[in-house]
Image: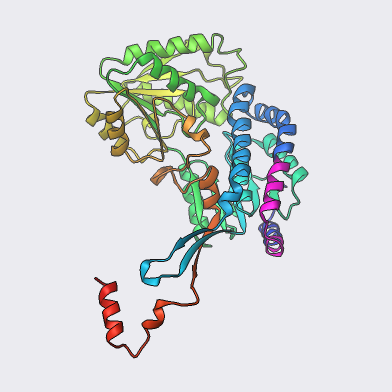
Amino acid sequence: MDDHISESALRALLQAQRMAWARQVPDHMQRMDDLARLRVAFQARFARLAQAMSDDFGQRSRHESQLSDQMTVLHDIDHARRHLKHWMRPHRHWADIAFFPAHIEVHPRPLGVIGVIAPWNYPVSLALMPLVEALAAGNHVMLKPSELTPRTSAALAELIAAVFPPERVTVVQGDAAVGAIFAALPFDHLVFTGSTAVGRKVALAAAANLTPVTLELGGKSPALIAPGYTLALAAARIAQGKLLNAGQTCVATDYVLLPRGRALDFVQALRAYVQKHYPALRSTPDFSSIVSARHYTRLHALVDDARAQGAEVITLPDTTAHDAARRIFAPTLLLRADASMRVMQEEIFGPILPVLEYDSIEEAIATINSQPRPLALYVFDDDARRAARVIAAIPAGTAGINDTVVQFAQTRLPFGGIGASGMGHLHGHAGFLSFSKQLPVFRQSRWSGLGLLRPPYGKLAERMLRWLAR
């Protein structure tokens, strides 16, 4: 699609999908076939998609693309096809005892046409996973990829066009102005994945149509390392998640809290991790570039602001690892970070990691709760009771104990934010439910006790009402 596609053209696309859906709502066979054909085409074209992502970023690790964009989509398709018949089945129960012998049923019904606005950081998986769940629920879909990854958007459009007619699934390419028009269309449900600031605008646009939204945002996701936990193990698991996609991950650790006096030990553990896994940071194909010059400059500005306010800046393995030409931003630790610094007020979305020290678990909990509610909370603790207490005390969208990021890849776990980090849930059955109307059905039997509660009310009715209201 052209960057300047008009509002009237977008509304015509939506109307065509709405009419096609009304003519033939996808049944189980159609949904299974759609997902199967998408899987085959996706596998055949993934090398092209991976190259497009790398071209858009400047450099993106092929292996990380396989882990984060290929594996997740395939698992989502396979999980949906494996469980779809059960998900679609009406759930039947006895009605409340006052209405015996009636039955109640809940029928999952598709909503109609779903709008999906996908982000640039994982431009394939975060576009296709909501698509998979919306198709599994029996909907048609309009997909708007990010304008920051135009080659990937074009490759996605080719993939979708090879699998689906446009009245079932279509890809709308375009700039931010097109995205704003897209968000204001009267979809039956709208999904947005991106920043909290843009998420607010999307929610406002959708509200004009009373369009329900699922917002997958971000925020400041902390990792709390408890006393006694092995720092080398915590550092390795935090670094693996943080350096995936060069930190451009919504559930990456945004700052670390550890017991006072352990900061330098943590630095040494992270230094050892970087030296082992990225021995030649500027030349390795395993470390991804920052997506754009603007974002690369933004990250340097965050570090400069923190340094000016007293933070100690430690670049791993050293400052020569930065490469502006290729937008390689070396892993950077900030010691003595505090709430006044921009890096502690904004989502980082890069390989910068502020390190804070605490004197007690209660102090650490209070520090986290002073921030907007995070998309992810990570606790490293061998004491299961204490870890559970931390998770109970901190509202968060998702949580991980003794690891980071991997909770996102679990098809059996709902994924979603809370407060400033989002609303609603996706992934697996949770996504199917988000894109379905849970239609309540009351099924009356031939004989009904309610017939005894008709006027004129006599003594029998009075006795029944006393018993029901006891």
In the picture shown, does residue 141 fall above or below 331?
A: below
Asked whether 23 falls inside the magenta stretch, the response is yes
* Left or right for 426, reference 394: right
Here the colouring is: rainbow
Please determine whether, in this image, residue 283 is positioned above or below residue 216.
Answer: above
23 with respect to 348 (left or right): right
Residue at 72% x, 39% y is 154
Say whether residue 25 is magenta: yes
Q: Quadrant of residue 292?
A: top right
Which image quarter holds the C terminus?
bottom left
In the figure, is residue 314 to the left or right of 81?
left
Q: Is residue 411 above or below residue 319?
A: below
Q: Predominant secondary structure in magenta? A: helix
Counting labels gives: 0
Magenta stretch: give its range: 19-38
Please say whether residue 74 is visible from this viewpoint: yes
Q: Position of residue 465 (x, y in %)?
A: 29, 77
The foreground one among 73 and 373 is 73
* Viewer-closest of 435 and 125: 435
Is 12 in front, or is 160?
A: 160
| Residue 141 picture location, percent across and down | 65, 52
Please give the name of the residue rendered at 53% of the width and 62% of the height, measured from the top-left corner. 209
From the top left corner, tell me how far across and down residue 463 is, in percent. Answer: 26, 80
Name which residue lies at 36% across and 88% down.
455
Closer to the camera, 294 or 64?
64
Whether residue 177 is visible, yes or no, is no
Which quarter of the figure has residue 368?
top left
